[in-house]
Image (cartoon, rainbow, N blue to C red):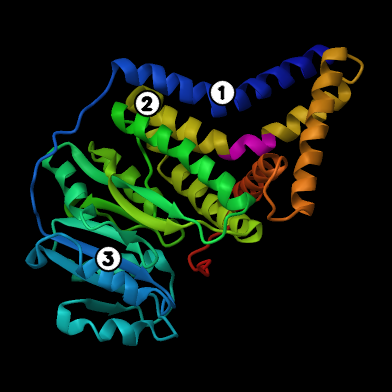
Amino acid sequence: MTTILIIITCIFSFIIIYVYLGYPLLLYIYSLWHSQSVRKGDIDPKVSMIIAAYNEEKVIKEKIENSLNLDYPKENLQIIVASDSSTDRTNQIVADYEKKGVILYVQKERKGKTMALNNAISQANGEILIFTDATAMLEKDCIRQIVRNFNDPSVGCVCPKVIYRNVTDNNITQIEGLYRRYEFCLKKRESWIGSLAFVAGACYAIQKKLHKPVEPEYDYDCISPLDVISEKYRVVYDPEAKFYETVVTSSRDLFKSKIRMITKDFAGTLSRKNLLNPFKYRWISLTLFSHKLLRWLIPFFLIIVFICNLFLIDIQLFQFLLVGQIIYYLGALFGLILKEKKGLFSIPFYFCIINLAALIGVYRAILGEKIPVWQPIR
């Protein structure tokens, strides 16, 4: 029995280390010899920008002004606001811009962001679709930088770089910023080797001919890239195309948003299980397993390791491991007590929040919970 517990502990400990350190190292080494360049070109195809909005009266005017002032030929840029039955002044504000060519699509009954985007596509006349949130502010040349990638016929989807603007500088925004930079590094390497399989939901672009309606219980930014890959096209990350977003500033909001995202995306990824076939998709399947599925399963592995460790308390090595785990989780508890203050306990606090959200999100996804409609966190 002791031997079995040691093996189980070692296996799951190895998986945890692999997900956070081993996979990035493997990705880095492989990308040194297997890099796929993108043949960019200065092109200006027709672009339809679709802005998802639900009760965005505080930011929608700024978003439209930002969109109208982008450095892209006006005759080739169509702006559509997909309002998910907004009940505030969002629709009235957008209507004021109809003379400037902004199209308002109102979903009469609230059915969620995904259905609003599905239905608003009927208004789009561009070769390239850019899906963006009302809070995402694009740099002036963002669209130009994005479409340059579509000069390469193998590119079907483009993920620009998001730059986070902190409203409040606290432990959440500080660690979330570090985590995002870690994610950017992974996305860049995955893009280089042709295995990038997800995008930032606040802004990304796909070829219209590759667009497929997304099931309302899933997120566009999870499913669209997977559908593009299924059609044998590439998803690429372009750090030269930039837009700005605001980081969630409270642990409560971060926790709620992560649960929602993981619930939808875990189920969404499994809904395209053909891409998990390593014999057909190789690095794509490895990326989906390593960067997404195994990452979200980490809390289950942590629980298994901790429980096994309790039964191995008589072995000195595992005594040290158990003490280390207890100290780490106590650090997270102190981080919770200190709330938003920066300091030594920020990292364990953030780590535990993210993994607790993953635990709940995966559990809900396995139970088949669907979240077609949700309240955006502002």
3D distance between C-alphas at marks 1 and 2: 16 Å
Q: Residue 193 appears at what percent x and percent y?
A: 31, 26
What is the quadrant of residue 240 in the picture? Answer: top left
Residue nearest the observer in this picture, 304 or 100 = 100
Q: Given this view, does label 3 or label 2 mark the residue nearer the observer? A: 3
User: Which of disc 2 and disc 3 is earlier in sequence?
Assistant: 3
Residue in the foreground of this view, choosing between 206 and 246? 246
Give the percent coordinates (x, y) of residue 117. 32, 66
Measure how far apart labels 1 and 3 are at the Cα level: 38 Å
Q: Of circles 1 and 2, which is in front? A: 1
Label drawn at residue 283: 2
- Residue at image x 69%, y 53%? 341
Q: Going by the picture, which residue comes out furthest to the right?
A: 314
**Region rendered in magenta:** 296-300
The residue that appears at 13% across and 60% down in the rendered structure is 72
Q: Residues within 10 Å of mark 2 (few under 14, many from 20)?
A: many
Q: Which residue type carries mark 1?
A: Tyr
Q: Left or right: 370 with respect to 343?
A: left
Q: Amino acid at mark 3?
A: Ile
